[in-house]
Each structure stands twice: as structure tokens, then as C-alpha cells.
Image (spheres, grey):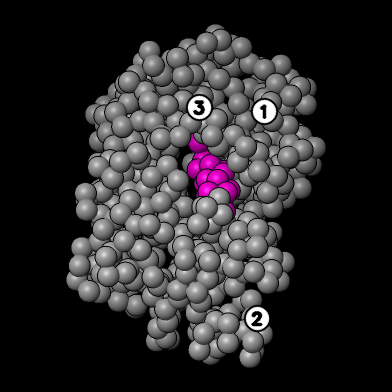
């Protein structure tokens, strides 16, 4: 049954579930977007508003299910990597159903070739993304949010710190609403140009006889259904790990994949290195609360960041790195622990919960309420612990040519797909960057009378000991690098897969250089840019 005949007979059904609905329009569509997380939803709804007939495939349902989530189980080698399972969510809305909504732009330096950082630079400049960053801010509900750090300091009633030429004081922002499935609910359900298919687990792209063009995409359900969808253009918005896993799967016809002739898919995998590196001992005058995690102005939330300036990075030959002061009332980062407990409750990871965990959550529930209703300028000012401990936490960029890699496990999931294996690694340049940053911060805090920074002994030991404190922060980066050549990347500057005429990747896996900043804001900007490219390409066709 053709798509046109189906629509004539039955009318358009805009959200269908492949596990339940018998009659489904298989196309052809103008654009098939695979994955309904931040990038997929933004791209699909934007194209649908432009009049394109769009199919959006989502592997999960409208509600989180451990049954669907199990398909994300995999193997880990190298450093421990919680993000393989805990940092991905197979549900409509993807990771936006669970994230904190923190927004940061990549600095211009991250897009540039740095002589001291091998493999650095993007094939596009930051100027190219600026108009798309502005569109992303509007989507995220942050257009009215203060954009200049000096305005934020003034709103807090404080003078900006005098960090001189070493450290740049800045603030990240937080989206007022975070779940993209809820934000776009009306369009997902009611835009006549958009069809959303749930429980559509994409398993293979089926190519033409010349292996140049994608004709159809094969989807399977956990209850045994197999179906193929056709489209003129296909975009993979599967997430950083899953995009690599999908493109690494062997083809059913046994032929090699044209997009992996150089064996680059999955290589140079990165996350942002995160760890606590020093204690901060307050002077007689308390460290201003603005330095402690989260602050708010006019209902907008921010987190203070202390970034190593570009000229200092060049002089010290470091990677991009920033830090912030976190608040401990015991042996844990209180907010990080509370957010993690909430995520486990939402995703029914009850086996991880304990009485101590729940008691800790109850003790810090007022801080979670502050995030929903910021009722003071500083979250810490809402209730200060008499025995608070302050620690310096860093978020650091990894080497663009990291030895980290995503490969396929020997194990298969319930659909017959090989599971992912994540080999997360660190480099000596990352260790060097952390050490340099702590030394600079120690001097800056001393000069400004902000307290004494006491580095941990592990900073002076070998990198292996320091690496034991590293944790990933669910920022799945690279593996399908953007580049000017198939010799050095998997997609071109427009995100089109090298070797294919009509397939794209819009995922954090395309980042050639990650900087230190949270990646979702840049990913949304890339999705808007890709929507413009696909629209212009359709007009030229």
C-alpha cells in the first residue's frame, strides 16, 4: 500500500506505535529523521514547519521503559564509563527527559586550529554558528536571560572578581523547561507534515546498487515486527554513542560500509573529564555564595565558571578547561548526588537506592525546589550548613585525537544488533592541563583573598592515579568527526556522510573539538543549521 493511498483511505495518523498500530505509512517521505532527542526533535519540527513531509523515528515510547532501555546495555573497557547506560535514555525526548538543561556556547577558540593541540579545529568558524546559537536560545526559553557576565554580577549585587589575565569569569545558563518532548508536544501530535513513529528501532540503512544513496531504513520492534521506511533524505540523530554503534553494524549483504572505508567510525571518542582536584579553605571572611554552584536572577538560573583564558592555554600548552566550586556537607557533592537519586527514581533504578540515599535526597529537597523556583539569588544562601566543605571541580576538554574508541561487542541485543563497547581513555596532555589549571587557580584565589586552594596529592603523582578520580558527565563526543576530507572524518561541514549522497549525522559524535562546554546548545545550533541546508538543497534540486 503506497503512502498516498493509505492517507486517502485512513487519514493521517501523526503519532504511531510500531508495536501496536497495524497501518503505517512507509513513505516515501522528504526527510526521515532517526532519533527523537534534542537534535531530532528540533530538526524534524523545524523542517515540518517549512512544509517538508517528515518522518521522525524514535526507538522508545512516550514513556520511559526499562525494557526499551536494555538495548543501551553494552561493555566498557579502559576507564569506568557510567554514561554508556546511565547517560542515555531510549524514550521520546531522549536525554532531554532527564538532563539539567545547562547551556553553554563553545568559545571561538574551540573552532580554531591550535598549534599546541593536535587535531584541533572545526571546518566551520564560530561566526557560522552565531545566528543558530541565537535561534537555539529562543527555543530554550533564554532570549530574555542576561547574556553578559557583568550584567549577572551586577544583578547579584557584586563586583566581578579581578582574575586579571589568567582566568575568565563566566556563567552557564539553565533552560526553564528541559523536556523537548513536552516543549514540542503540540507539534509532535498535531503538525500534519510530521509523522512520529515510536518503538522504531533503526537497524540498517539499505543502499542503492551503487552504494551511493540510502533508499530505505530497516526498523525492528521488540515484539518481532520488521518494517522499512523510504525517504529522499535521511538524518541520524541517534546520540553520540548510538550514532557510532549504528554505523558500525555489519550490513546484511556482507558488503563493506562506504562511510567507513578509512576505519574512522568510532575513533577519537571523548567525554569531558570531570573530577574534584582541590579543597578550598575559606578565609575569615566567607567566600561569596555566588562562587558556589548555582545563582539566579529574575527566575533564570546560572552557574559560575572559571575558565582558563585562551592566551594562557597557548602559553601553557593546555587543552580548554574550566572549574567551579562545589559544596559538600559530608563526603559527597550534594547537588550531584541529589540529581542522580532523582534520575534513578524516574528511571526505576530501584536496585541502586538505599535508605541513606533517600535520606540524603530528603535533606536536600529544598535545593531541588530552588532549581524549580529560584527563590533567592544564591542557592547556598537558602540554607547554609555550618560545616560546609568547599572543593574545586574541573571540566576539561579531551584531546581531539583521543585514543578513546567505540567498537562493537561480541554480544547482541534482543534485536540482533551488536552492543556497543566504550573504551574511554585519557592522555598526558589532559593530565598536564589539569595540573596547570589548579596552579593558576591557586594563585588567583590567593591574590583575590578568596581562600586557599589545596591541591590533592594525586595531582603530583602519575596520571594513572589521578585518572582514578575521573568521571564522565554523559557528554558523548566524536567518533563521526566533521572534517573537510574522508581521510580525516566521517561527515563534511554540512554533516553529510562522506560516501553517501543523501545521509547526514546530527549528533555530538560529529564534534571534532569539544572545548570544555556542555555540548547540547551547540548541537541544537547545528540542527538549525542543517535544517537550513536541507531546505536550500531541496530548492536547488
Residue 329: x %, y % from top left: 57, 39
Residue at 59% in and 73% down: 195
The residue tagged 1 is: 290
State the residue position of label 3.
108
Give the secondary structure at mark 1: helix
171 or 486: nearer the eye? 486
Compared to 155, does 133 lie above or below? below
In contact (CB < 8 Å): disc 2 and disc 1: no
Marker disc for residue 441: none
Kindly indicate the quadrant of the structure image that contains residue 46.
bottom right
Residue 417 point in image, percent of width and height: 31, 72
Residue marked by disc 2: 12
**For residue 129, side relative to residue 271 (left or right):** right
Region of the chain picked out in magenta, as a range = 516-535
**Nearest-to-viewer mark from 1 and 3:** 3
Report x, y in % for residue 294. 65, 36
Residue 116 visible in the picture: yes
In this rendering, does residue 38 appear at all?
A: no
Main secondary structure of the magenta stretch: helix
Question: Spatial distance from mark 1 to mark 3, Cα to Cα?
Answer: 26 Å
Q: Is mark 2 on a helix, strand or loop?
A: loop
Q: Residue at x 62, y 30 (%)?
A: 171
Amino acid at each position: 500500500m503506497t503512502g498516498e493511498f493509505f492517507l486517502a483511505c485512513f487519514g493521517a495518523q501523526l503519532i504511531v506505535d510500531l508495536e501496536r498500530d497495524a497501518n503505517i505509512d512507509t513513505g516515501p517521505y522528504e526527510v526521515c529523521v532517526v532519533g527523537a532527542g534534542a537534535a531530532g526533535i528540533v530538526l524534524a519540527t523545524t523542517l515540518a514547519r517549512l512544509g517538508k513531509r517528515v518522518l521522525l523515528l524514535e526507538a522508545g515510547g512516550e514513556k520511559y521503559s526499562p525494557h526499551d532501555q536494555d538495548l543501551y546495555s553494552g561493555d566498557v573497557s579502559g576507564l569506568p564509563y557510567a554514561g554508556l547506560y546511565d547517560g542515555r535514555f531510549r524514550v521520546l525526548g531522549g536525554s532531554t527527559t532527564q538532563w539539567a538543561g545547562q547551556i553553554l556556547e563553545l568559545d571561538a577558540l574551540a573552532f580554531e586550529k591550535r598549534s599546541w593541540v593536535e587535531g584541533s579545529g572545526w571546518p566551520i568558524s564560530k561566526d557560522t554558528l552565531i545566528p543558530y546559537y541565537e535561534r537555539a536560545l529562543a527555543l530554550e526559553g533564554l532570549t530574555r536571560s542576561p547574556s553578559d557576565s557583568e550584567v549577572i554580577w551586577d544583578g547579584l549585587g557584586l563586583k566581578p572578581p579581578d582574575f586579571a589575565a589568567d582566568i575568565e569569569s563566566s556563567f552557564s545558563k539553565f533552560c526553564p523547561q528541559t523536556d523537548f518532548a513536552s516543549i514540542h508536544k503540540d507539534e509532535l501530535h498535531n503538525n500534519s507534515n510530521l509523522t512520529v513513529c515510536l518503538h522504531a528501532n533503526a537497524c540498517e540503512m539499505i543502499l542503492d546498487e551503487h552504494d551511493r544513496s540510502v533508499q530505505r531504513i530497516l526498523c525492528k520492534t521488540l515484539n518481532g515486527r520488521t518494517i522499512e521506511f523510504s525517504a529522499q533524505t535521511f538524518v541520524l540523530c541517534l546520540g553520540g554513542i548510538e550514532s557510532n554503534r549504528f554505523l558500525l553494524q555489519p550490513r546484511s549483504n556482507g558488503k563493506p560500509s562506504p562511510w567507513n572505508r578509512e576505519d574512522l567510525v568510532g575513533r577519537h571518542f571523548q567525554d569531558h573529564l570531570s573530577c574534584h582536584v582541590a579543597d578550598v579553605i575559606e578565609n575569615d571572611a566567607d567566600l561569596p555564595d555566588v562562587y558556589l554552584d548555582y545563582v539566579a536572577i529574575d527566575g533564570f538560573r546560572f552557574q559560575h565558571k572559571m575558565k582558563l583564558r585562551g592566551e594562557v592555554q597557548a602559553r601553557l600548552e593546555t587543552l580548554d578547561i574550566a572549574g567551579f566550586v562545589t559544596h559538600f556537607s559530608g563526603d559527597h557533592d550534594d547537588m550531584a548526588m541529589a540529581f542522580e537519586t532523582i534520575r534513578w527514581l524516574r528511571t526505576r533504578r530501584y536496585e541502586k537506592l538505599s535508605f541513606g540515599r533517600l535520606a540524603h535526597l530528603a535533606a536536600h529537597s529544598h535545593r531541588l525546589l530552588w532549581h524549580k523556583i529560584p527563590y533567592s539569588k544564591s542557592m547556598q544562601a537558602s540554607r547554609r550548613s555550618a560545616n560546609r566543605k568547599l572543593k574545586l571541580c574541573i571540566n576539561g576538554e579531551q584531546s581531539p585525537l583521543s585514543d578513546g574508541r567505540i567498537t562493537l561487542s561480541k554480544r547482541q541485543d534482543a534485536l540482533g544488533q551488536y552492543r556497543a563497547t566504550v573504551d574511554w581513555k585519557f592522555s598526558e596532555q589532559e593530565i598536564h592541563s589539569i595540573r596547570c589549571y589548579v596552579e593558576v587557580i591557586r594563585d588567583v584565589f590567593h591574590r583575590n583573598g578568596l581562600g586557599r586552594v589545596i591541591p590533592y596529592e594525586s595531582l603530583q603523582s602519575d596520571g594513572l592515579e589521578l585518572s582514578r578520580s575521573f568521571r564522565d558527565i554523559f557528554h558523548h563526543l566524536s567518533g563521526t568527526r566533521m572534517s573537510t576530507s574522508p581521510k580525516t572524518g566521517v561527515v563534511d561541514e554540512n554533516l553529510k556522510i562522506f560516501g553517501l549522497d543523501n545521509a547526514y549525522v546530527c549528533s555530538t559524535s560529529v564534534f571534532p573539538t569539544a572545548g570544555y562546554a556542555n555540548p547540547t546548545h551547540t548541537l541544537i545550533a547545528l540542527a538549525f543549521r542543517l535544517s537550513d541546508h536541507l531546505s536550500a538543497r531541496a530548492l536547488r534540486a
